[in-house]
Amino acid sequence: PGIKDAGIFVVSAATMGDVHQLTGLFMKDYVECHRRLHANVRGTAAEWLTALGEIDFEAVLHEVSGGSGTSIRLLKCSKLGKDGVGTGAVVGYALYELRTKGPPGRRQRYCELVNIVVRRDHQGCGAGRRLMEALHEDLATTARRQADDLRLYVAEKNAGPLAWYRRLGFQHVGWQSEVAGDSEVRFLRMAKGHM
């Protein structure tokens, strides 16, 4: 459903000035998308926020700007205008976190892709691909240990992103359920790289 002449996308670190647009993308193109996908689930917006994990972008950006070595990263994707100048409109974002778990000697270091969201009218145009490329570039230069182990959850009914992750080499390695309203919603655990 994307705009095929979407032009060139540019990815950069999100800033405090992007909080309103990021929150709008999260609510409209992530939370509402899941509510549409699961139309049979009678959950309120608040219940869906709990099930999906509400994101306070202002708090995230405070943490990101708090100094070097932060484990959380937030990239935004904007569309360039015909004159090569950014339109200012954020059309997508990637939120990811560097994680470590397990006992010494068997410690796992990986990157958890918390959200990658692209505005509905820009899906299928390369914005998601550009965000994923930028994520890989960032990990390759700043977090090599996590670069080879990417993990995420995706709703089982979210066919488009599920197929995209599979094309990118992610494999189904498990699942978990979250409660929204009166129903359980199943999320597939996917991973790429070392497990």
Image: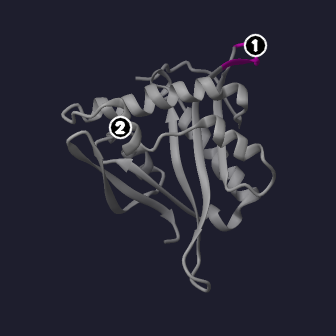
Q: Residues within 10 Å of mark 2 (few under 14, many from 20)?
A: many
Q: Is residue 60 visible?
A: yes
Q: Is residue 76 left or right of residue 187?
A: right
The quadrant the N terminus occupies is top left
Which label is found at residue 7? none
Residue 86: say if magenta. Answer: yes
- How far across and down, in percent of the image, does residue 93 sit? 58, 36
Residue occupied by mark 2 = 48
Q: Is residue 75 visible?
A: no
Residue occupied by mark 1 = 83
Decide: is 107 above or below 45.
Answer: below
Nearest to the observer: residue 11 or residue 2: 11
Nearest to the observer: residue 79 or residue 119: 119
Specify the amino acid type for callout 2.
Trp
Q: Quadrant of residue 109?
A: bottom right
Specify the amino acid type for callout 1.
Asp
Residue 15: say if magenta. Answer: no
The structure residue drawn at horizontal position 55% and vertical position 33%, both measured from the top left corner, is 126
